[in-house]
Amino acid sequence: MKNAIVIGAGIGGLASAALLANRGFKVTVLEKNSAVGGKMNQISSNGYRFDTGPSLLTMPFLLEKLFKECGDDINNYFEFEELEPLCRYFYPDGTLFDNFSDRKKTVEQIQSFAPEDSENYSRFLDRSEQIYDGTADAFLFNPLYSVQDFLKVNPLNFLDIDAFSTVSEKVDEYVKSDYLRQFFKRFTTYNGSSPYLAPATLNVIPHVELNQGGYYVKGGLYKIAESLHKLAVSLGAEFTFNSEVSHIEVQSNVISGVKLDDGTTLKCDLLFSNSDATETIVKLLPDQSISKRTKTRQQNIEPSCSGFVLMLGCKKSWADLKHHNIFFSSNYKKEFTDIFKNKKLPEDPTIYVANTSYSDSEHAPENASNLFILINAPYLSETQNWDNISSSYSNFIIHELEKRGLKDLSDSIEFQKVITPEDFYNLYRSNKGSIYGTSSNNKFSAFVRPRNKVRKFKNLYLVGGSTHPGGGIPLVVQSAFNALELLERQVIG
Ligand SMILES: Cc1cc2nc3c(=O)[nH]c(=O)nc-3n(C[C@H](O)[C@H](O)[C@H](O)COP(=O)(O)OP(=O)(O)OC[C@H]3O[C@@H](n4cnc5c(N)ncnc54)[C@H](O)[C@@H]3O)c2cc1C
């Protein structure tokens, strides 16, 4: 039985552990923290429970496939459901927009505040579906590693996937009202990028949520991490917590093992790293094992945005709040200039509020609310001092939400916790505190994202949001499928 080590128990590490154990490898997962899940984490205090990472599941068929490939059934582990509405949007002028998966219901809403776009909404979603059909097999479900993979990419398709305009330009072509323009541009943030920079191919994302469905996992999204852990353990994978890998050991072009921060060395035949690709290539691999050029190229890949998270346990509920809520900023372009160019927290941010107590009454005491608030934030740079910013920015956000209708919010708070970009780095070693891996802020991003096997080494595979095909739960699961496929090709070849 060959020994496989997996560094990290994020979603990519958990999915890899299950797939490898199912293929007969003796799997050891080494996780620096005391629990599984990585950025998919949770906290509970004073009767309030929060998911501290993802709150929305898309493309659940990839998780279903994972359980099935491992001889199990996702339904044995957790239930997921579509919410009604999918999300409530609050515009600065007081306009409310409830977005439903049922297009007819949504269009009825649009008729009241942007009648000029009631047909354009559907036209845009049809276009989004077309882009998905033209890109999914070529870019998502394809490791894009060897010639055989690139042969699956039809160059003619490039002409029809809007790779040469930005998300914002294409959205503006399709819809006329500022309301729907801001609405459709927002989906680019699911990949941690700016709609004013990212190629319009990313207009595929609205299809994934609005046509295919956006889901909530009953009990909280953390159930996904717990379930993948159970699955991997049931297949024989072993987990060691509080074990940070400090070095990868290399002999010639073969990984021979890893060294932990307490000095222990563990040997392996195969290494899957779910640590961020930049951490793995730049920090964990010995300098002499990989060229300076490769390290520099990796360091130069722009990370996705980070997040400023504020969790509030409030002894109050607000009739206007649904499960997912977005309070839009009044100058969307400026918001992204602040995040990606000025590298500072937006002065006028779009505020996402997940209020899971709306659907899961156990997540807060009676008549109380657990508000998980996320603001897109810059990735780490030398100019920021998060200790200084954190408390004043939290107060500013609380005040903004009060102005936008959450009356008496500050007086109702009985639990409060913040996670800054610096915390995201310290907790999960994500490159510069990024939360979705690498950004897609230029049209070549998909091609520079590290592949799921490092060519230089015989037995080093990379999985997770910083690798191909990208961040977010479903793509991270796909990265594990890709890595397995590349491993099997090598074994067979
Ligand atoms: C606030 C927030 C909101 C999000 N919202 C959504 C959403 O709604 N929907 C969605 O699909 N996605 C969302 N995402 C993105 C999603 O959470 C990530 O893409 C995904 O969870 C990343 O998984 P990963 O496999 O890359 O691993 P990570 O979560 O990055 O985990 C890596 C693991 O490796 C461990 N590790 C790192 N280095 C070492 C080392 N040297 N030794 C040992 N262990 C190590 C870390 O401790 C960690 O546990 C969100 C993320 C955040 C933070």
Image: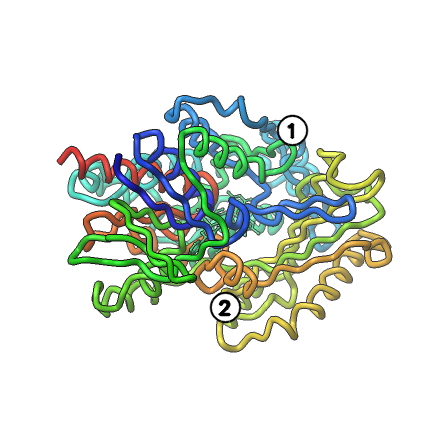
- Asked if residue 310 lies left or right of residue 3, the reply is right
**Of the pair 39 and 265, the residue shown nearer to us:** 265
Residue at 30% from the left image edge and 35% from the top image edge: 25
Residue on which disc 2 sits: 380
Residue 152 location (% of width, % of height): 22, 36
- Asked if residue 139 lies left or right of residue 352, the reply is left
Q: Residues within 10 Å of mark 2 (few under 14, many from 20)?
A: many
Q: Earlier in the sequence, mark 1 or mark 2?
A: 1
- Asked if residue 272 lies left or right of residue 334, the reply is left
Q: Quadrant of residue 408?
A: bottom right
**Of the pair 106 and 68, the residue shown nearer to us:** 68
Spot the residue most to the bottom.
383
Q: Which amino acid is tagged 2?
A: Leu
Residue 222 location (% of width, % of height): 58, 40
Classify the position of the N terminus by image quarter.
Answer: top left
Residue at 64% from the left image edge and 42% from the top image edge: 114
Above or below 452: residue 98: above
Q: Quadrant of residue 281?
A: bottom left
Residue 366 location (% of width, % of height): 84, 38
Residue on which disc 1 sits: 105
Q: Nearer the viewer, mark 1 or mark 2?
A: 2
Above or below 50: residue 68: above
Q: Which amino acid is tagged 1?
A: Lys
